[in-house]
Each structure stands twice: as structure tokens, then as C-alpha cells.
Image (cartoon, rainbow, N blue to C red):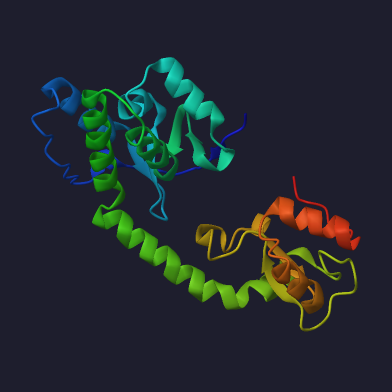
Amino acid sequence: MPENHLPTLYAAADLNLQLPDAKDLITPEDASRTRELIREGGAYTPAGQALQATKGVAQYLGTDSAGAKKFYNDLPNEDKVQNGNVRYVTHSALNKEVSRRIQEPRDVYKLERLKDAEACLNAFRDHPELEKRRLLAESKIRRELPKLKQKMLKAENITNCQVSGEPLQPDAEVHHIERQADQPHKSLEPANLLLINKPPHREIHDAAAHSPDALASLALEKKWPYKPRT
């Protein structure tokens, strides 16, 4: 299964990362191991997305190598990042799985370990440096959104509606395949953008076709020539 490749990641080890103290219910060995892995295996993108190297997954989830491997293999590609020889998973995917496990009937010590891992992961996610980068990324998105239409016209020489296939109208609009409200980090990604005429744009939103699969189904129903990008 292919992963996303990023040229640059920043290391959590370079931050003054303050992780919470473990409760005395957690053994010093487990507490130390969790914090060591987060500091050494944590990374973040220029836009402030938190990641963790896969070597720490078993520890955070309180599972074995087979369980960690299954978790990784079941993730969608967008939750996987590879930088050089190191594989990472997004904090959002990791936190979701930790939360799921906390809500299951488990041994009390395993539950305490999961809660400890969750607190440490969140402390890294909420570090001021990452929060600042996310705010800067949002500011950039707001600046660039008004320019998207002209950039797309210039870069791709689009002359037809990218959904209906009809001649592109002067008042054509930029459509986000996955909504900005749901996936703001994809607001400027070319793979998430289409330049389309107003009538099909309204039909897409009226039908709530806010995913690649939903848009493809609607296109089939409307007999539009649109084909999902691969």
C-alpha cells in the first residue's frame, strides 16, 4: 500500500516538549517508555500536523507488534506518511484508536496506560509551536482562496467544466471535492479542486455529494463525463 511522501518533517525532539507526569498507577518503565517514544518518534509537518513513528504504536495502544501492524495496515493512505525509511501515522488516527480502546472492557492497568498515552500524545499535538503553524496555515489558505480560479485557469488551461464537460462559463466556480469545512488542510490541494459551472456546482451541493465517491455516483446519475482522479 503506497504512503504519502513528504520532503521535510520537523522533529519533536527539537521542541521543549513538556509531557504530563504519569500517575503512580503506571510503572516507571511504562511511563518512561511512552514519553521517550513520543519525544524521539514524534514529528510534525510545516502546517503543524502531528505525527508519530510507527515504532511507538504498540506502546501507545497497549498491544503487540501484530496488533500494531494490523492498525497500520488498516489505515487509509491519508493517515500514513513516509519520510526516508521512517513510517509515521497521524495523531488524529492514533488518538481515535486510543479513544476506542479506552472505551472497551479492558484490564484496569491497560486502561490506565491508554489514558496516559492519550494525555502525552495530546500534549505534543497541542504544543504552542504546532498551534502557531496551524494558525499560519489557515491564514495562508484565506489569502490564497480568492486566487484559486485564476491559478487553475493559468496552470491547467481549463476550457470545459470539469464535471459536466460543457464549455466553461465566465462565472465558473472552484469546487472542493472534499469540503473545506471538513478537510481544511486540502483547501489548496490541486487534487481536491475542480473548476465547474454554476448549475452543476449547485446540484453537487444540493445532493450533498461531498466526497469523491459521492461525486462519482452523482456524475453517473446525471450522465456527466466526470471521472474521479486516480
**Relative side of 62 to 224, left or right:** left
Dividing the image into 4 quarters, which one contains the C terminus?
top right
How many labels sit on residues? 0
Residue 19 in the image, given as x and y percentages of width and height:
17, 42
Residues 118 and 19: in front is 118
Residue 106 lies, in percent from the top left, at: 31, 25
Q: Residue at x 41, y 16 (%)?
A: 65
Give whichever of 149, 200 is nearer the camera: 200
- Residues 28 and 194: in front is 28
Q: Residue at x 50, y 38 (%)?
A: 81
Quadrant where the N terminus sits is top right
Taking the image as shown, residue 154 lies to the left or right of residue 178, namely: right
In the image, is residue 78 above or below residue 215?
above
Q: Residue furthest bottom?
A: 171
218 left or right, relative to 151: right
Q: Quadrant of residue 27?
A: top left
Q: Residue 82, how many percent across, how many down?
A: 50, 34
Q: Quadrant of residue 12?
A: top left
**Residue found farthest to the front:** 105
Residue at position x 73%, y 64% from top? 194
User: Residue 130 appears in which quarter of the rendering?
Assistant: bottom left
